[in-house]
Amino acid sequence: MREPRTADWYFDYISPFGYLSLTRFDTLPGDLVIRPVPIVFAGLLKHWGHKGPAEIPPKRLQTFRQVRWLAEQHGIPLAMPPAHPFNPLALLRLTIAAGSTLQVVRTTYAHVWAEGNAGDSEDSITRLAAKLGITDPQTRISDAAVKATLIANGEQALAHGVYGVPTFHIDGELFWGMDALPMMAGFLKNPDHHREPLPFE
């Protein structure tokens, strides 16, 4: 029997495309083990020297129209948070404190993008923590080890060349965004074809 394959999935709750992508994981091979890795998208932007979609007004409008359209097309529940962009640090740290499992990530993404709760208010974080079984969220998200893990996750992402979220990293290859899932599935079936040289490499 073939050994299960593992893919790191880098994400930040600031991106609704991570939420949309989660709902499409069933299109990937059943033997693929997905390891969620929370990171700070702003750190990627700073490293690579480019702006996020929310910082470019026309792109911001188009992005959220696309998110709404994709949700409608795929039958994905969507209720946008009251404000965007928001500071995702508390959500990311809470995820790490809760174990960074896929179920924790799904619950957290749904809290913000399916139920329309704020991404960074203390009340919203407290209610999310209750869903995750955490009774002392402010203490947990302030824990030095949790903060250090989030920093290390970002450094790991940059070391792999990650430039956006959500991004899968598997066998040295990157697959960015919801629309890259079919390409990733193709790579898992035929990695040699994916790696055929491009004329300008």
Image (cartoon, helix red, strand yellow):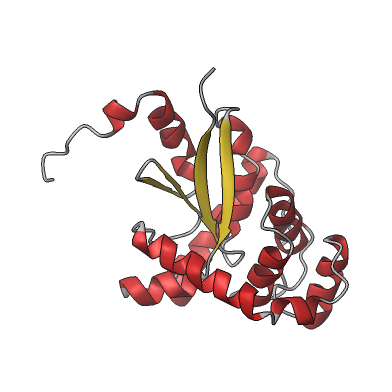
| Viewer-closest of 113 and 48 | 48
When the figure is inspected, residue 102 is found, relative to residue 119, above or below; the finding is above
Estimate the x, y position of residue 149 in percent, counting from the top left.
57, 69
When the figure is inspected, residue 10 is found, relative to residue 72, above or below; the finding is below
Estimate the x, y position of residue 145 in percent, counting from the top left.
62, 75
Locate the N terminus and report the quarter of the image it occupies: top right
Q: Is residue 129 left or right of residue 163?
A: right
Give the residue drawn at x 11%, y 39%: 199
Give the image quarter of residue 14.
Answer: bottom right
Q: Can the viewer see residue 146 in this picture?
A: yes
Locate the C terminus and report the quarter of the image it occupies: top left
Give the residue drawn at x 81%, y 74%: 124
| Viewer-closest of 1 and 130 | 1
Give the image quarter of residue 111.
Answer: bottom right
Estimate the x, y position of residue 11 in percent, counting from the top left.
54, 59
| Viewer-closest of 136 and 57 | 136
Q: Can the viewer see residue 178 in this picture?
A: no
Q: Is residue 175 left or right of residue 4?
A: left
Estimate the x, y position of residue 174 in percent, counting from the top left.
38, 47
| Viewer-closest of 145 and 57 | 145
Q: How many marks?
A: 0
Q: Is residue 174 left or right of residue 26?
A: left
When the figure is inspected, residue 52 is found, relative to residue 186, above or below; the finding is below
Give the residue drawn at x 79%, y 60%: 115
Q: Is residue 140 left or right of residue 20?
A: right
